[in-house]
Amino acid sequence: MSAKEVNELIRQAAEKAMRETDSEPEPGLTEEINWPIKVELHRGLAGAISNTTQIGYVNGAKGWLIYRGFNCFDLAEKSSYEETCHLLLHGRLPSSSELSIFNEQLKKYRRVPQPVLDVLRMIPTESSHPMSALATAVSMLGNLDANSEDISVENETEISLKLISQMATLAGAIGRIRQGKEPLTPNPELSHAANFFYMLSGTVPDEMNERIMDVSLILHADHGMNASTFTTMVVNSSLSDMYSSVVGGISSLKGPLHGGANQQVVLNLREIGSVENVDSWYQKKRAAKEKVMGFGHRVYKAYDPRARIFGPIAKLMAEKSAENKTIYEIAAKLEEVVVSELGQERKIFPNVDFYSGIIYKAMGIDTDMFTPIFAVSRIAGWTARALEYLADNRLFRPRAVYTGPIKIDYKPIEDR
Ligand code: ACO
């Protein structure tokens, strides 16, 4: 299996997406905005518009994911995570000399200060979630950076580069410490994806695993005003600092309704155990009114384009072992069962988290490290959007509708 084969799968997924969504309505939410505007609001801020952006766009009806005008299928097939980060942060694809400077900057920052590794070693692995350890590590990086309080766009951009580079080092170190092993020193000869894979697993990936990790990092890099991106931007809008803002993003991503779902998906597939059990497991979930992890999305009401790419890659990876094959077959059956009931009518399809966990599992990555991989990628979108907003900042400060009593007379404690 080769990187070329992976690229061919992505191209086929793109063609399928075009065929299936051609007749969907034209995109919305792309017009110029004259504030203030009127929108229909729903619980969970559904329908709310927080700002304008040139960074990325998700069209839920058509299943489009676009970074600065480039569709995700093209980027996944042809680009690299480094190039994608340049695109998100600086607004355009780099020339080859710009890309080599950018790569050198990222490589220069890969090593993290020793006290951060010391703190990570003090965190008890039995009781702590790796995302909590990641938040602690980023907070510690901020405490060690004498320039962290300089919130100029220029300095925050430099910190963003540092964080894009170091998030991979930190996640790698956390994964190794959780296995009772020593963190590895970054390898400057490797690409961002290959170095991350190496730091996590201790093995330099072959061409195919490097390509798949790269595709995964590209596809998770940005995704509209999702909960963790919004959290990062809200923290940054108080003119806090980029480290604190990213700690907020990590904490939001941790939850099972957001980035924590891929871990849950693999646990569920293991619990189901065999293709024959899929139907009865699903019926039990429905009867208990529980959601099926890895399905549904606030914005996508068509098939998530990232799942279109990850599905065939998961199938390819499944060939590696009998256990992976079984897990994949259970997943494919579960997709069939869920989509046949909830697809057409409720517009519930697999999301990015449904197949990504299967891929990471086949790469030999521990289940509890799946969400940190998401953070290693999404740091690009968090920082790019926080920086864009910082350039014309206004504090985020919505209001809540108060539904309690308005006027109650205060009674002394002895009269209550
Ligand atoms: N399984 C079964 N039913 C579902 C699912 C699901 N996965 N997702 C939504 N529904 C149903 C809900 O039960 C609800 O039905 P009702 O109207 O009869 O009450 C309806 O669809 C709307 O669901 P909400 O939770 O209100 O939709 P919301 O837009 O708030 O949720 C979310 C989006 C959180 C992603 C939801 O689909 C979910 O919980 N999915 C499972 C968790 C998951 O996979 N998260 C990863 C999302 S992708 C990401 O963040 C990277």
Image (cartoon, rainbow, N blue to C red):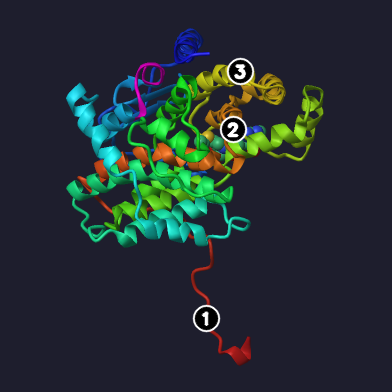
Of 100 and 231, the residue lying toward us: 100
Q: CA distance from mark 2 to mark 3?
A: 15 Å
Identity, as a three-letter code, of the amino acid under mark 1: Asp
Disc marking residue 409:
1
Can you tell which of label 1 and label 3 is closer to the viewer? 3
Of 17 and 301, the residue lying toward us: 17
Answer yes or no: is residue 399 visible.
Answer: no
| Residue ID for mark 2 | 364
Answer yes or no: is residue 244 visible.
Answer: yes
The mark tally for this picture is: 3
Of 91 and 328, the residue lying toward us: 328
Instruction: Report the span colored magenta.
Output: 73-81
**In the image, is 40 to the left or to the right of 370?**
left
Disc marking residue 256:
none
Q: Mostly what secondary structure, the magenta segment?
A: helix
> Tag 2: Cα neighbours inside 10 Å, few (<14), some, or many (≥20)?
few
Quadrant position of residue 291: top right
- Badge 1 marks a residue whose secondary structure is loop
Residue drawn at (33%, 36%) of the image: 188
Residue drawn at (29%, 56%) of the image: 241
| Residue ID for mark 3 | 315
Quadrant position of residue 281: top right
Of 284 and 38, the residue lying toward us: 284
> Tag 3: Cα neighbours inside 10 Å, few (<14), some, or many (≥20)?
many
Proximity of marks 2 and 3: CB atoms separated by less than 8 Å: no
Q: CA distance from mark 2 to mark 1?
A: 63 Å
Q: Is residue 77 above or below residue 82?
A: above
Quadrant location, ligand no. 1:
top right
Identity, as a three-letter code, of the amino acid under mark 2: Gly
Q: Position of residue 152 (x, y in %)?
A: 18, 52
Can you tell which of label 2 and label 1 is closer to the viewer? 2
Identity, as a three-letter code, of the amino acid under mark 3: Lys
